[in-house]
Image (cartoon, helix red, strand yellow):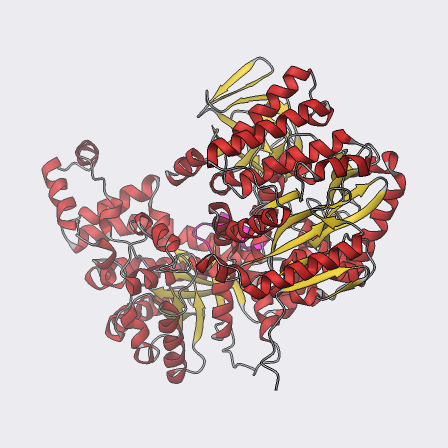
């Protein structure tokens, strides 16, 4: 009787056949699955094999390989020798391999690669004889020793580079590939000596030893800082692991009829349907992405190696039709013959994602629903980036390559750690480097934009910035970046750390100073995509808007009402603040009413303008929420100045300020508690709301006010405030001889309100979940102070997401779900919405949709994101049971 079936640990591909398929990304990783699939459909791919990603985490835990893996690797090496006619470790006809990472989700540049593995003092002579090109053979050897020393042994790159530069200087050449053979041979000796001095042992000569060291290093690269940071940014689980791909080497550095490059089947910045990318002749892949040599645009390959270019164009179209998506491809040309080394779904800027999705619908490749699902909602952020106002005075510093669209201004910094530090302190910074490396990733996340002196459109800086939606200018060769002196010299000028520049990633231009920026205009593809999304989604999208300008902006972005109008924001300027302060310091009710009478026309005018902007869509107005001390100064000089202005003794005003000071104001006298203690405040605001509503209605305008009581903890609190709302609204309707329909509800932002939602729903017609405060009160966290330790919690895995950014389903979400259920049991037509910051976050929107809420509300620039996220949620839920929703 045979034992249980064991899944293979190694999957071979070559000679038109493969053990794996594109559907096996979880096992083969994206790179391995792509190589297997390309082999099967007849794309020219060098043969190789993939070690399953399932081994990664177990190796990282115990640092041992299973015995059966060693047997399967050796069997696969024999198959590889048969497919290539070469022999691993054989001096006369050596087989060399590359060893590359490849997770199920693409993580470009985050993990390790080793090329030319199998070279030693014996096989290098065989490669030289086989190729009839000793210079190429020894160039490959020195690359291998340097790469292996860095990846496997963890040696710093700088000493290797210094030795190389010294040899080039001595030989009088600028390019690495122009070094004479003797210099390459000397470099190999130097590099091996460096390894010996740093490690205390010789560089490994046995190819099998080299291979197992490389396999281990690729697995270990899963846990490098840059890989961990990348996974956090892109929500990739740590439990995924990486596969290891061992592929027969093909050489782009063998002569001028050879080369290597990166190509996209469409432009990843604009979405244009044309081959896009870069290449270098007589080079290996690291030369293109490292930024050490500036590559040529892919269109020029048509002139230099025309047959290979034609084959690349055909291959790109074939792969795009097969995978039904834009492809990101790596290729090598060896003596005129094209080999594909990778294909994967191409990362693209937000502009390109929208255009590609729409055009693929037009081309019949995908459906409208697939187009909706293809665009990550947060990518729409990139379409909403500001651009430079060309009518402003601009001081051009330099021009480079437009590597990632958008514009940003900030203070110059020259290292990633400082970028992260200054950004955490609230400063806008631009990261300026000669070229970026994966170690700079955390600084690129923190920076507003990235600027490099070297590199091309597919350099590390370009690819990473584009994926994050950061503006980037690469290859600005006029810049002389002195990172040690913390300055940059350009055309006779010197910019020091902290000076401001503006980077325009759309044009490739860099300007001195802070340029004026203008908001973007959205194109037809954006409108089409969101129109398709609107046809699919159930959830309504509203905007958080406190001013008429915000309301108009929200409507322009497709908002279907206002879900949160914070009335207190109207009091923080000019005469309004003075009247508000007068009300706070008043000694009696009459004094407060006099001050409120001054505020009434100001509030009424604001509400009227907001109602008009919303053109009949619902407007949810939250009554005054913050504690009163927020409207008063704190410093003695400011208190003294205000006292003079208000004809008060400074000591008296100080006494009032002290009396309003609270140990924990977020849990103090605020929200409905203010309205209960000072009912005249509620009465003034309600009068302003309904006088404005009547004015709009009298002029044939459409108006739909929703009055929201904040921070309700008990139904009795709500009932007391609701009584004022109903009394004052009736007075206004009687005075104006017109009635405006309205609804009256509350914010659910305290755990007690969620737990007693059935009682509150007897009185309230709608619930709006204020998840910012509900998160604070559920977790016992202060948003203002939690930043001191939440990053550590995230780093140590105590929490998966910042609960203020992504709704905590297990805790806060359970309270929200309970409140929805209890509320609708009492009042089946209860309207439900969410108006915290989570209202613009895709995962939180999906949760609201699952609960059957009527709407979410978010900041104006998040409205398009919410519209698309709601549509994607609806598509994901299709096929499940229908849910009953109250009519909005």
Magenta region includes residue 819: no
Front position in the image: 61 or 198: 198
Range of magenta residues: 544-556
Magenta region includes residue 551: yes
Asked whether residue 242 is in view, the answer is yes
The quarter of the picture where the N terminus appears is bottom right
Front position in the image: 615 or 759: 759
* In the image, residue 506 above or below residue 17: above
Expressed as whole percent of the image width and height from the top left, the position of residue 205 reads: 61, 41
Expressed as whole percent of the image width and height from the top left, the position of residue 340 reads: 77, 50
* In the image, residue 133 above or below residue 67: above
Residue that lies at the very extreme toward the right in this rendered image: 307
Residue that lies at the very extreme toward the top in this rendered image: 492
Q: Is residue 549 left or right of residue 710?
A: right
Expressed as whole percent of the image width and height from the top left, the position of residue 674 reads: 23, 59
Asked whether residue 361 is in view, the answer is no
Front position in the image: 612 or 383: 383
């Amino acid at each position: 009787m045979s034992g249980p079936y064991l899944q293979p640990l190694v999957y071979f591909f070559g000679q038109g056949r493969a053990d794996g398929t594109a559907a096996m990304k979880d096992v083969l990783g994206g790179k391995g699955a792509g190589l297997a699939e390309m082999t099967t459909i007849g794309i020219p791919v060098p043969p190789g094999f993939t070690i399953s990603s399932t081994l990664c985490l177990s190796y990282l835990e115990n640092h041992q390989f299973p015995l059966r893996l060693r047997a399967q690797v050796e069997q696969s090496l024999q198959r590889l020798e048969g497919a290539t006619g070469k022999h691993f470790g054989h001096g006369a006809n050596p087989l060399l391999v590359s060893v590359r990472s490849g997770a199920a989700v693409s993580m470009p540049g985050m993990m390790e690669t080793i090329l030319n593995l199998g070279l030693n003092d014996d096989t290098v002579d065989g490669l030289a004889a086989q190729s009839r090109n000793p210079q190429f053979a020894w160039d490959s050897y020195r690359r291998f020793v340097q790469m292996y020393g860095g990846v496997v042994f963890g040696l710093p790159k700088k000493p290797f580079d210094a030795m190389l530069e010294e040899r080039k200087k001595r030989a009088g050449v600028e390019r690495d590939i122009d070094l004479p053979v003797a210099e390459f041979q000397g470099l190999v000796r130097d590099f091996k000596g460096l390894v010996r001095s740093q490690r205390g042992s010789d560089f490994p000569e046995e190819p099998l030893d080299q291979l197992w060291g490389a396999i281990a290093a690729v697995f270990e690269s899963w846990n490098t800082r840059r890989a961990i940071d990348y996974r956090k940014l892109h929500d990739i689980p740590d439990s995924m692991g990486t596969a290891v791909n061992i592929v027969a080497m093909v050489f782009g550095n063998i002569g001028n009829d050879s080369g290597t490059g990166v190509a996209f089947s469409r432009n990843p910045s604009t979405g244009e349907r044309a081959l896009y990318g870069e290449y270098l002749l007589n080079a290996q892949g690291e030369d293109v992405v490292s930024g050490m040599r500036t590559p040529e645009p892919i269109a020029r390959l048509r002139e230099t190696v025309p047959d290979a270019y034609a084959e690349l164009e055909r291959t790109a179209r074939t792969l795009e039709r097969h995978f039904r998506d834009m492809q990101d491809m790596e290729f090598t040309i060896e003596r005129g013959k094209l080999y594909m080394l990778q294909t994967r779904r191409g990362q693209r800027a937000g502009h390109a994602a929208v255009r590609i999705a729409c055009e693929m619908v037009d081309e019949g490749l995908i459906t409208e629903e697939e187009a909706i699902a293809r665009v990550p909602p947060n990518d729409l952020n990139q379409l909403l980036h500001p651009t430079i106002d060309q009518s402003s005075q601009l001081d051009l510093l330099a021009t480079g390559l437009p590597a990632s669209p958008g514009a940003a201004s900030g203070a110059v910094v020259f290292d990633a750690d400082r970028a992260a530090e200054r950004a955490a302190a609230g400063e806008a910074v631009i990261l300026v480097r000669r070229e970026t490396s994966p170690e700079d990733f955390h600084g690129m996340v923190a920076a507003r934009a990235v600027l490099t002196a070297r590199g091309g459109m597919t350099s590390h800086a370009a690819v990473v910035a584009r994926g994050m939606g950061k503006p980037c200018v690469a290859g600005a060769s006029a810049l002389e970046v002195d990172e040690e002196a913390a300055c940059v010299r350009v055309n006779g000028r010197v910019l020091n750390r902290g000076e401001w520049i503006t980077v325009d990633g759309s044009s490739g231009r860099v300007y001195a100073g802070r340029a004026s920026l203008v908001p973007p205009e959205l194109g037809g593809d954006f409108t089409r995509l969101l129109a398709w999304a609107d046809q699919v989604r159930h959830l309504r999208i509203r905007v958080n808007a406190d001013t008429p300008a915000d309301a108009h902006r929200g409507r322009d972005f497709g908002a279907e009402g206002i879900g949160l109008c914070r009335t207190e924001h109207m009091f923080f300027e000019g005469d309004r603040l003075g009247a508000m302060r007068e009300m706070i310091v008043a000694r009696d009710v009459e004094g407060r009413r006099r001050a409120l009478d001054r505020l009434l026309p100001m509030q009424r005018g604001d509400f009227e303008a907001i109602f008009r902007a919303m053109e009949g869509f619902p407007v949810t107005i939250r009554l005054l929420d913050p504690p009163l001390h927020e409207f008063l100064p704190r410093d003695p000089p400011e208190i003294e100045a205000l006292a003079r202005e208000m004809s008060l003794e400074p000591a008296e005003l100080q006494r009032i300020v002290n009396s309003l000071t609270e140990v924990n104001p977020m849990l103090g006298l605020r929200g409905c508690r203010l309205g209960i203690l000072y009912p005249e405040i509620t009465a003034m605001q309600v009068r302003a709301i309904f006088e404005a509503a009547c004015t709009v209605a009298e002029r044939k305008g459409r108006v739909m006010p929703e009055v929201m009581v904040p921070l309700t903890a008990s139904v009795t609190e709500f009932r007391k405030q609701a009584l004022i709302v109903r009394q004052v609204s009736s007075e206004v309707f009687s005075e104006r001889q017109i009635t405006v329909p309205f609804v009256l509800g509350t914010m659910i932002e305290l755990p007690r309100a969620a737990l007693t939602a059935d009682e509150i729903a007897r009185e309230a017609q709608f619930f709006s979940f204020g998840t910012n405060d509900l998160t604070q009160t559920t977790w016992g966290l202060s948003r203002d102070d939690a930043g001191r330790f939440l990053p550590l919690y995230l780093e140590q895995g105590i929490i998966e997401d910042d609960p203020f950014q992504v709704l905590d389903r297990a805790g806060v979400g359970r309270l929200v779900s309970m409140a929805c259920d209890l509320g609708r049991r009492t009042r089946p037509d209860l309207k439900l919405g969410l108006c915290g910051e989570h209202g613009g976050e895709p995962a939180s929107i999906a949760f609201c949709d699952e609960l059957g809420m009527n709407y979410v509300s978010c900041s104006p620039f998040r409205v398009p994101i919410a519209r698309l996220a709601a549509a994607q949620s609806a598509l994901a839920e299709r096929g499940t049971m229908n849910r009953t929703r109250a009519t909005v």
